[in-house]
């Protein structure tokens, strides 16, 4: 276990850049699934590794070993006490970060929806705020809301407004906030995964761009609407944490993608193989360490 348990903690340093590079060659939806899925898998394996290290150290304590009728020093004799203590501290930090991130995503989003409903005129899934600062964003939840200010509506012509609303609606129907939440929780578990934030945000915005272009049937109008909305955006109040907006991210790159007909590109095979190997090795080592940990407990109980 002493060797296998460290692998899931180190592999995100290599797997995250590989996932980022691979996502650039994929369609937006596939890229979003790849980035979020890889982050969740790597974070789960690294958290499990910390738990195994901390657990092995805890079982070396006589009071804990006595609870399970374990014979010392068989249990956990491969894990040093300092390593177990560090793992326990890191595991506690991960737990606190996960709770804090969950609260921010759930509580603050609900608070923002209530504030938007109280201060704006609602029609269906649309809430219009009487605010001169041009802004628009999607607020996830039950129900999800599209929030747009009167300043943004005046900044766009009717066709561009249709694109903007279709873009924000695509965020809600595609449940893009779940992708961002999954990545946020993963980043709380392992800091090396933070480099996937920008690529995932871009992939989700590209998903919504393509959906809006399909809804209006004109990619040039969609590109013009995204560009004008981004140039006009001057929010007078901070956006809620969970908000997704058409005016964020690398807008020039997104506009260029809309003006260029999408064409399939071949994913770099070597990078794909490397990422698959990292994910498989991380999961395999976590399972091997867990099996070794369980075997040690059974051996100590049989003495």
Image: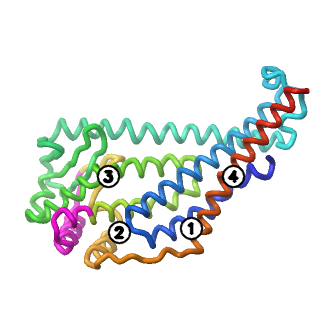
Give the spatial CA distance, label 3 vs label 1.
Answer: 25 Å
Give the spatial CA distance, label 4 vs label 1.
Answer: 19 Å
Report helix, strand or loop for mark 3: loop
Q: Which mark is residue 250?
A: 2
Of badges 3 and 1, the one in the foreground is: 3
Are the residues flagged by discs 2 and 4 in contact, CB closer than 8 Å?
Answer: no
Q: Which residues are magenta?
A: 211-236
The residue identified by callout 3 is 174
The residue identified by callout 1 is 18
Could you tell which of marks 2 and 4 lies nearer the N-terminus?
Answer: 2
Give the spatial CA distance, label 2 vs label 3.
Answer: 20 Å
Residue in view at x 14 percent, y 65 percent = 160
Residue in view at x 78 percent, y 44 percent = 83
| 234 vs 66: above or below | below
| 234 vs 52: above or below | below
Report helix, strand or loop for mark 4: helix
Dominant secondary structure (helix, strand or loop) of the stretch shown in magenta: helix
Looking at the rendering, which quadrant does residue 102 occupy? Answer: top left
The residue identified by callout 4 is 284
Give the spatial CA distance, label 2 vs label 4.
Answer: 37 Å
Q: Is 260 colored magenta in this rendering? A: no
Looking at the rendering, which quadrant does residue 220 occupy? Answer: bottom left
Could you tell which of marks 2 and 3 lies nearer the N-terminus?
Answer: 3
Of badges 2 and 4, the one in the foreground is: 4
Could you tell which of marks 3 and 1 lies nearer the N-terminus?
Answer: 1
Give the spatial CA distance, label 4 vs label 3.
Answer: 32 Å
Report helix, strand or loop for mark 2: loop
Within 10 Å of disc 1 (Cα), the crowding (few <14, some 14-19, many 20+) is: many
Q: Is 215 colored magenta in this rendering? A: yes
């Amino acid at each position: 276990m002493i060797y296998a348990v460290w692998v899931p903690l180190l592999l995100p340093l290599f797997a995250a850049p590989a996932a980022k590079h691979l996502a650039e060659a994929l369609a937006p939806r596939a890229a979003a699934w790849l980035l979020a899925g890889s982050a969740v898998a790597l974070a789960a394996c690294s958290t499990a590794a910390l738990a195994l290290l901390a657990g092995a150290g805890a079982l070396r304590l006589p009071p804990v070993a006595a609870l399970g009728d374990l014979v010392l020093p068989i249990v956990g004799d491969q894990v040093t006490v300092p390593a177990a203590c560090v793992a326990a501290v890191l595991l506690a930090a991960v737990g606190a970060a996960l709770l804090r991130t969950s609260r921010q995503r759930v509580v603050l989003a609900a608070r923002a929806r209530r504030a938007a409903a109280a201060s704006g005129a609602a029609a269906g899934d649309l809430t219009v705020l009487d605010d001169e600062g041009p802004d628009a964003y999607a607020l996830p939840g039950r129900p999800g809301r599209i929030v747009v200010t009167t300043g943004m509506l005046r900044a766009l012509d009717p066709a561009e407004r249709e694109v903007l609303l279709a873009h924000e609606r695509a965020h809600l129907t595609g449940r893009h906030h779940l992708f961002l939440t999954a990545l946020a929780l993963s980043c709380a578990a392992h800091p090396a995964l933070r480099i996937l934030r920008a690529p995932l945000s871009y992939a989700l915005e590209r998903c919504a761009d393509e959906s809006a272009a399909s809804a209006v049937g004109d990619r040039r109008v969609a590109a013009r609407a995204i560009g004008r909305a981004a140039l006009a955006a001057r929010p007078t109040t901070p956006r809620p944490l969970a908000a997704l907006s058409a005016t964020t991210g690398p807008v020039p790159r997104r506009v260029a993608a809309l003006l260029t007909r999408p064409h399939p590109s071949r994913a770099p095979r070597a990078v794909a193989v490397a990422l698959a190997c990292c994910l498989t090795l991380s999961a395999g080592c976590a399972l091997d360490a867990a099996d070794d940990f369980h075997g040690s407990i059974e051996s100590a109980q049989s003495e």
